[in-house]
Image (cartoon, helix red, strand yellow):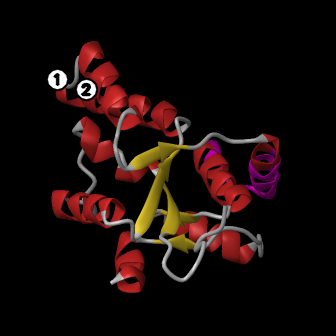
Amino acid sequence: MSKKTGANKSLAILLDSSYLLPVFGVEVREINDSILLELRSLALRKLIEVHYSPISFIEIVSKVAKETMRKGQGLSQEEIESTIKIIEESEYMKPICPCPRAYVLAYRMKLLGHRDMIDNILYAIATVHGLIFLTLDQKLRNFIQHHRIKGANILTHDELLKIVK
């Protein structure tokens, strides 16, 4: 699959976990409801093709638990399960899993010093499948540039919206 599959085809993107956190009630300062609604609208109009990886749920559940412990309240186990099901059954988001080549690239990134294995795997999935990786993670961008790792384009939602509109 390529990032852009033809003149009238949509851009294929992989969401970083940050773009799924608000669905679980975890605030991400740079991502508000209007941004998520805009991405959904673009996907429904076939301007972008949105993918997520179930690998993100590892990071998300951990952050939801951390927020729950910090605040003393949060999602119940049933709410976490139902939110995951909503994403899995979404009309505009498609799941994508890592293949062996993605794990190898993630492993290589870890050996080069990038400590966040979830980000490594997500970036590697985007690279192997020819997707744009939608993330706000500037440290990851800097790491990839510094080590000259060839692979997926990395964009923020602002950068993506400038391209699509």
Residue 68 - label = 2
Q: Is 39 located above or below residue 89 in the figure?
A: below
Do the CB atoms of the residues marked 2 and 1 lie less than 8 Å apart? yes
Q: Looking at the image, which residue is at 36% across and 46% down?
A: 20
Disc 1 target residue: 73
Q: Looking at the image, which residue is at 37% across and 70% down?
A: 157
Q: Nearer the viewer, residue 71 or 161?
A: 161
Sequence order check, earlier mark of 2 and 1: 2
Q: Is 162 located above or below residue 92 in the figure?
A: below
The range drawn in magenta is 104-117
Q: Quadrant of residue 29?
A: bottom left
Assign a secondary structure to mark 2.
helix
Where does the image place residue 107, in percent across and percent down from the top left?
79, 46
Q: Quadrant of residue 127?
A: bottom right
* Count of picture labels: 2
Three-letter residue code for mark 2? Thr
User: In whole angstroms, how far apart are the C-alphas of marks 2 and 1?
Assistant: 5 Å
Where does the image place residue 21, in percent across and percent down from the top left?
33, 44
Q: Nearer the viewer, residue 75 or 113?
A: 75
Q: Is residue 105 magenta?
A: yes
**In the displayed structure, does residue 106 sit left or right of residue 12?**
right
Q: Looking at the image, which residue is at 58% across and 43% down?
A: 96
